[in-house]
Amino acid sequence: MPPVSPPEPSGPPPVPPPEPPPPHIDESVRRVTRAGKDTLQSALGTGRAIRKLLSADLALARSAFGRAMAWVGVGIVFGASGWLLVTAAIIALLRATLGWSWLSALATCAALSLAVAAVAAWRVACFFDMTGLHATRRQLSKLGIFDEEQKLEEIDEPVSAPRRPEELGP
């Protein structure tokens, strides 16, 4: 059986319904007021979110600062008290077993001490980097607030003469 096509409508095409008239001025004012209130609520919500983010970022910074101070303490303890005894033992062994001079034995122990101090300084730098409030800065930069890179670029731009209004265009 061949497919049956639907019958074609006869007569003039249907007329689309007329557009509703524009709202009265009172209704327009109510709509604009409602949109303004919604915008204000959104801005307040954004402000609360930024405040919570800043609070969490400060808590992270506080924790990182405490950890950095703990690593400083570790560096000081091992660098000052315990290492003196180890250095003395190493120097004694180098002198007695290998026959090194006092200068070479002391220089070797000093190099080892500096290496341990460098590792402790590196760990301190890593934890201090966490105190930079990076997440808050990223979000504020997205909002166009506290954008340090943009300010630095503006400072580096040469100052040009003011332009006349007809040069600015439409």
Image (cartoon, rainbow, N blue to C red):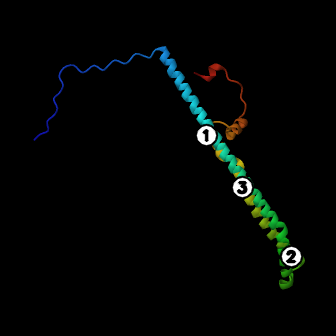
> Circle 3 is placed at which residue position?
127
Q: Quadrant of the C terminus?
A: top right
How many marks the image carries: the answer is 3
How crowded is the residue under tag 3: few (<14 C-alpha within 10 Å), some, or many (20+)? some
Q: Residue at x 11, y 40 (%)?
A: 2
> Circle 2 is placed at which residue position?
88
Q: Secondary structure at mark 3?
A: helix
As measured in the structure, the alpha-carbon distance from the residue carrying label 3 to the one carrying label 2 is 32 Å
- Using the rendered view, name the quadrant where residue 41 is placed: top right
Hey, what amino acid is under mark 1? Ala
Q: In screen coordinates, is 91 left or right of 155?
A: right
Q: Residue at x 51, y 20 (%)?
A: 30
Is any part of residue 84 visible from this angle?
A: yes
Hey, what amino acid is under mark 2? Ala
As measured in the structure, the alpha-carbon distance from the residue carrying label 1 to the one carrying label 3 is 25 Å
Q: Residue at x 43, y 16 (%)?
A: 22
> Circle 1 is placed at which residue position?
49
